[in-house]
Amino acid sequence: MTKAARGNMRDLQKELTKTRLKEAAIACFVESGYLATAVTDITSTAGATRATFYLHYKTKAEVVDALLDELDMVYAEPFSRFAAVLVEPSLDAFRVWLREIVKIWETTREISIVVSEAAGVEKEIGDRRGRSFDFETDRIAKALSATGRWTPKQAKIRALLIFSQLGSLFMQWSMPDSDLDAVEAVDVLASMWMAALDEREFH
């Protein structure tokens, strides 16, 4: 085996180990909660040592940061289209977009819950979520303001309310005993957004 091949094998093994640790961390966080999970719980589940864990992650928070990277990739494309959907509002367009987001959220539900819990106790995670919120609401506000239908201040208020409503809906679905009906929730939220973006209400 050549030196390059051995190097590639080592890199692959490192990535596999890192992935195994991350998956073990998710399992532990989901079962016991972020705060109650210790590094030893993660390493025991992964069949690894503490030393191995610290070769790949400095802290539990760094694992969650990696999970946030994954969530950002999953949501990047639909959220990049969100402002355009809001600029040309219609009930059908809102429903289609929301149904897509709900399907995505269902596949990332466990990770999203873990991230939310970690954000409450880890400043760096909370700060990163805050920056993401600011980025998305600023993008929406700029798009709405560019239409000329609202002033920048009016557009910002709508962007904050719209994105906050979406986040609140996800938080409700995150509750273990939630019986919130997704179909009805999508219809109600779409109607609320239409009302918020009907400039005739404000002239």
Image: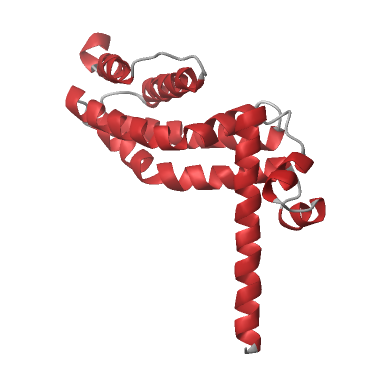
Decide: is 128 above or below 52. Answer: above
Residue 104 is situated, as x and y percent measured from the top left of the image, at 38, 37
Residue 94 is situated, as x and y percent measured from the top left of the image, at 25, 27
Decide: is 141 above or below 172. Answer: below
Left/right placement of residue 130 relative to residue 49 reads left
In the rendered image, the quadrant that contains the C terminus is: top left
Q: Looking at the image, which residue is at 65% across and 79% down?
A: 7
Left/right placement of residue 185 relative to residue 134 reads left
Nearest to the observer: residue 133 or residue 102: 102
Decide: is 198 above or below 67. Answer: above
Nearest to the observer: residue 203 or residue 36: 36
Residue 125 is situated, as x and y percent measured from the top left of the image, at 64, 36
Q: Looking at the image, which residue is at 31% across and 17% down?
A: 189
Left/right placement of residue 96 relative to residue 20 reads left
Residue 158 is situated, as x and y percent measured from the top left of the image, at 37, 21
Q: Quadrant of residue 123?
A: top right
- Furthest-bottom residue in this view: 2
Q: Quadrant of residue 36?
A: top right
- Please say whether residue 119 is visible from this viewpoint: no
Q: Looking at the image, which residue is at 49% across and 42% down?
A: 71
